[in-house]
Amino acid sequence: MKLLIAIIQERDRKAVTDALSSSGVFYTKIASTGGFLRDGNVTLLLGIEDERLDEALAIIRDNSQAREQYVSVPPPEVLPTPGMIEAPVKVTVGGAVAFVMDVESFERW
């Protein structure tokens, strides 16, 4: 058994969770926030059998899209030079990050 932790952008949440549910893959959803743009993310926790791991990863990969967007407000820790007008910057957002860990023990009550 594996523990799959997938961090996806809020915008991709419905597509990913609908596809997982349709495939009979159970998950726990936790709201989270990204560190760079402070955008909403969703962290999914999946306890998954070894033989279904590739299927779950493919579902997440196929339903979470990286895309470019323009950001005009820098993160709060970046202080602009006084009087300077910030030009929008193109950044890549979305997609997913997945961590897979071995599970030593699993109990359900």
Image (tube, rainbow, N blue to C red):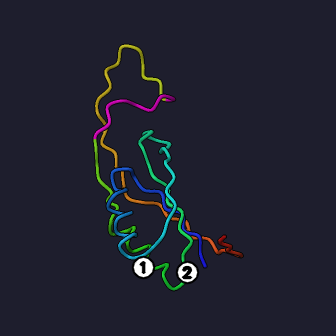
Residue 94: which numbered mark, if any? none
Which image quadrant for residue 38?
A: top left
The span shown in magenta is 70-77
Number of other residues with Cα within 10 Å of mark 1, as a class: few under 14, some 14 to 19, many 20 or more: some
Asked if the stretch drawn in magenta spans residue 5, the answer is no
Asked if the stretch drawn in magenta spans residue 71, the answer is yes
Q: Amino acid at mark 1?
A: Glu
Which image quadrant for residue 49?
A: bottom right
Helix, strand or loop status at disc 1: helix
Q: Position of residue 102 (x, y in %)?
A: 64, 75
- According to the picture, the residue beneath numbered tag 1 turns out to be 55
Q: Is residue 70 above or below residue 2?
A: above
Residue at image coords 35%, 61%: 64
Residue at image coords 32%, 61%: 15
Circle nearer the N terminus (2, 1): 2
Q: Is residue 76 above or below residue 26?
A: above
Helix, strand or loop status at disc 2: loop
